[in-house]
Amino acid sequence: MNSKIIDFIEKNRLFEKGDIVLAAVSGGADSVFLFHFLLGIRDKYMLKLKAAHIEHGIRGEESLSDCRFVENLCAEHGVECFTLHIDAENEAKASGLGVEEYSRKRRYEFFDSVECDKIATAHNLTDNAETLIFRLARGTGLKGACGIPAKRGKIVRPLLCVTGEEIRNYLDGRGIPYRVDSTNLTDDYSRNLIRNHVFPVLKQINESAETAIARFIETAAEDCEFIEEQARAAEKEAVQGAGLSVEKLKSYHDAVLNRVLMNYFSGNGVSLNGFHLEKVRKLLVSRGKTQLSGNLFAVSDGKTLRFARLAESEKNTDKKFNFKQNVYSRSYFLNKCELSDKRFDFYCDCDKIIGSICVRSRRAGDRISPAGRGCAKTLKKLFNELKIPAESRGDIPVIVDGGGVIGIYGICVDERVKAEKSTRSFLVVNVLTEDSI
């Protein structure tokens, strides 16, 4: 069995000569086997071995006894041992996390606090098979079907090629003691249900069910890596400005397309679940935006799909702008334009204004009839036509009087207040930026 594990280590390049390896040792069969195995190969790889144990405070004296067992094991073999005591149930409740999730989080935080090159955990082939069954029952894709990786960052898992039964048989056959966690015999946790009830049934169908599942995991991992390679190349090909070409995206196979989208948004700090992935895909056939999380959106103008962090005003908050307004006679206004060659960002017929004006950000339902266009449309549709990025729309000043929207600063004036040959006085609006206040 040792030679099988060494072949697995070599294949996955889990250790380098001279590594400082921290072994996670709970005292159970798997971790005790890992500890003894690492002792056996430390000269081969010139490893410096350390051990870490967390006492979770759940099983009372049994848990404390496990901790003493690990400390004595390490002392017997001259291995430095790091221990941490936590109150997992109460601390998890205070943090709002489940006990399993909280315990896992604290474990890896503790492991990361110990100086080392590699963190070796005792996950085995049986654990990997249980993980796949668990994920399938909860819902997963091809990536989730790849199971537990042999290596991720500093974490290495040398025992993924052997079953839990093989490990226990090895220890029992050599009289090597280990601890048995009494909670493993209950059905309080999802994994225990799988271990105690699902796997016995699977083994009635195929006594080598774990090995068969492991072969599937290996195949899934190979297929997944191939799709990842295709997706990485496709994403580079699809890059268009700050986003991705809709035309290119639509040409990809669904398997590649999904991975391109997940990778692109993951690179911008957003993980797409199945629900959001479907909503993003709909943007490939229609313009618009979809909320991913908080103020994070996917936005499409029909040609480019991109990630956007929308301004607060895009979420129906109102933004007011500082502005100056001046009224000029016709002759003065025309002379000012001619002499200074100045183009005003907004002006209109002052006599057509209803009440007073204000300058604000756009609101849902705002409409305008752009002068000379002979039609009315929402500001949303106008901005779409002008290909104005969604995250910038809340920063565009909208000029309003008592009758509604009369203009978009720097873009257009409404037909109702446009200046004509008969205009006697002109209203000029200048929006003040921070530099001009």
Image (cartoon, rainbow, N blue to C red):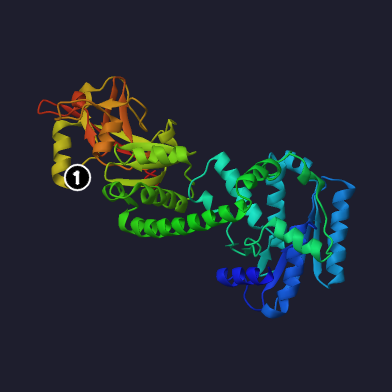
Residue drawn at (76%, 72%) of the image: 39
Q: Is residue 141 left or right of residue 54?
A: left
Quarter of the image for residue 281 reads top left
Residue 340, given in percent of the width and then of the height, sits at 18, 47
Q: Which residue is mark 1?
A: 342
Locate the N terminus and report the quarter of the image it occupies: bottom right
Residue 371 lies, with reference to residue 118, above or below; the image says: above
Locate the C terminus and report the quarter of the image it occupies: top left
Query: Which element type, helix, strand or loop, lies under badge 1?
Result: loop
Residue drawn at (41%, 33%) of the image: 320
Q: Residue furthest left?
A: 421
In this rendering, does residue 310 appear at all?
A: no
Q: Nearer the viewer, residue 197 or 321?
A: 197
Residue 248, given in percent of the width and then of the height, sits at 28, 51
Residue 159, given in percent of the width and then of the height, sits at 66, 63
Q: Residues within 10 Å of mark 1 (few under 14, many from 20)?
A: few
Residue 372, given in percent of the width and then of the height, sits at 14, 30
Residue drawn at (14%, 37%) of the image: 334
Residue drawn at (39%, 58%) of the image: 232
Quarter of the image for residue 138 reads top right
Residue 244 lies, with reference to residue 229, above or below; the image says: above
Residue 50 lies, with reference to residue 391, above or below; the image says: below
Q: Nearer the viewer, residue 329 or 382?
A: 382
Quarter of the image for residue 52 reads bottom right
Q: Is residue 280 left or right of residue 68?
A: left
In this rendering, does residue 374 appear at all?
A: yes
Please give the count of numbered marks on the rendered protein: 1
Residue 282 lies, with reference to residue 261, above or below; the image says: above
Q: Nearer the viewer, residue 377 or 209?
A: 209
The amino acid pointed to by label 1 is Lys
